[in-house]
Amino acid sequence: MQLPTTFEALFEEANQYDLYHKLVKQLNKDFLLANIDLGFHEAILPTSLKLLLHDTVYKLIEDKFTDYLNLLYIVDVPEKQVKALDGSDTLKLAEAVSFLILKREWQKVWYKNNFN
């Protein structure tokens, strides 16, 4: 499986396989498991999903760092990838982490679809 390298490519691939709604469901499931009160509507536009996820991750980093770490653990974002990011600008860090979250969630959805 070749992972997408941009938000746009990820959303395009999810739509191509008709799995975008499952991606949103997986995000909702993992946010609920991480005890983060955020539920994405299944019909949310990709641009809105990206912005809302980015904003949420930013607020978690700034105000609830333990919840942020718990979310990364629940989603199963590789620690090595997070540590490789530049943390000097929190806004850019939140955007990069949001993409890592979406990429990991996309992997889960893709594998479930192809191997179940």
Image: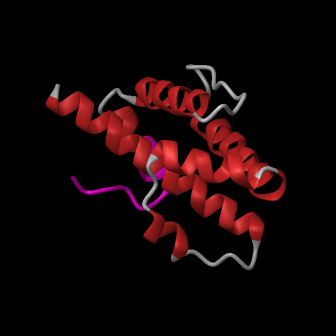
Res 106 → quadrant: top left
Residue 8, horizontal then vertical, whole percent: 49, 50
Residue 18, horizontal then vertical, whole percent: 34, 26
Specify the color scheme: secondary structure
User: Is residue 87 a member of the stretch shown in magenta?
Assistant: no
Residue 12 is left or right of residue 51, and the answer is: left
Seen in the picture, residue 67 relative to 35 is either above or below; the reply is: below
Residue 44, horizontal then vertical, whole percent: 61, 26
* Quadrant including the C terminus: top left
Toward the viewer: 90 or 78?
Answer: 78
Residue at x-position 68% and y-position 75%? 87
Seen in the picture, residue 96 relative to 70 is either above or below; the reply is: below
Looking at the image, how many numbered discs can be counted on the residues?
0
Res 56 → quadrant: top right
> Looking at this rendering, what residue extends furthest in the left direction?
115
Seen in the picture, residue 108 relative to 55 is either above or below; the reply is: above
Residue at x-position 48% and y-position 44%? 75
> Looking at this rendering, what residue extends furthest in the top direction?
42
Residue 41, horizontal then vertical, whole percent: 63, 20
Toward the viewer: 71 or 100?
Answer: 71
Residue at x-position 63% and y-position 78%? 86
Toward the viewer: 79 or 98?
Answer: 79
Segment colored magenta:
1-11
The answer to whether any part of residue 77 appears in the image is yes
